[in-house]
Amino acid sequence: MKEVFAVHAVRPAEVRPTELICRSLADAEHHASELSTDPGVLAAGITRFVVDELGTRRALALYVDGVKQQVPYVSDSRTIHANGAGH
């Protein structure tokens, strides 16, 4: 089984396509933490996939302002949701 970890940014009114695919969760978490502090980024999410296996996609983490949140996560301002949807 080969796991990969996709990192994507949540911006107002959009979820960006995958910014980076990492082989290790530690690398994905580092990038997501940094990405979540970029101007205009509300949050950065990490999704785990198993290569060549359908149905293995799983949301693992969401970072807001560099801090890891619990998944599922709804922000206090109700503008950031763990599934990437915004209001």
Image: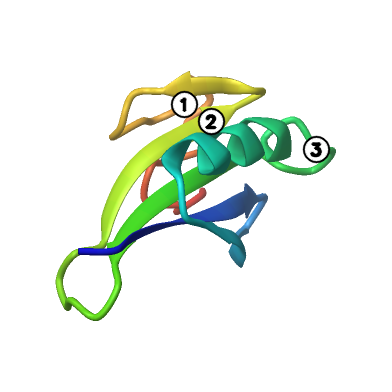
Q: Dot 2 lies on which element?
A: strand
User: What whole-number distance in Å separates the C-alpha atoms at marks 3 and 2?
Assistant: 12 Å
User: What whole-number distance in Å separates the C-alpha atoms at marks 1 and 2?
Assistant: 11 Å
Is residue 4 shown above or below 61?
below
Is residue 55 shown above or below 49?
below
Name the mark nearer the viewer: 1 or 3: 3
Contact check, label 1 and label 2, Cβ < 8 Å:
no
Q: How is the image coloured?
A: rainbow
From the viewer's perspective, is 39 left or right of 25? right
Q: Residue 63: give its label.
A: 2
Residue at x 54%, y 53% (from the top left corner): 7
Residue type beneath disc 2: Tyr
* Residue named by callout 3: 38
**Res. 36 in view:** yes
Q: Position of residue 5 (x, y in %)?
A: 43, 54
* Residue named by callout 1: 75
Task: Say few, some or many: other residues with alpha carbon within 10 Å of mark 1 (under 14 / 14 to 19 / 20 or more).
Answer: few
Residue type beneath disc 1: Ser
Quadrant of the image occupied by residue 73: top left
Mark closest to the chain's N terminus, 1 or 2: 2
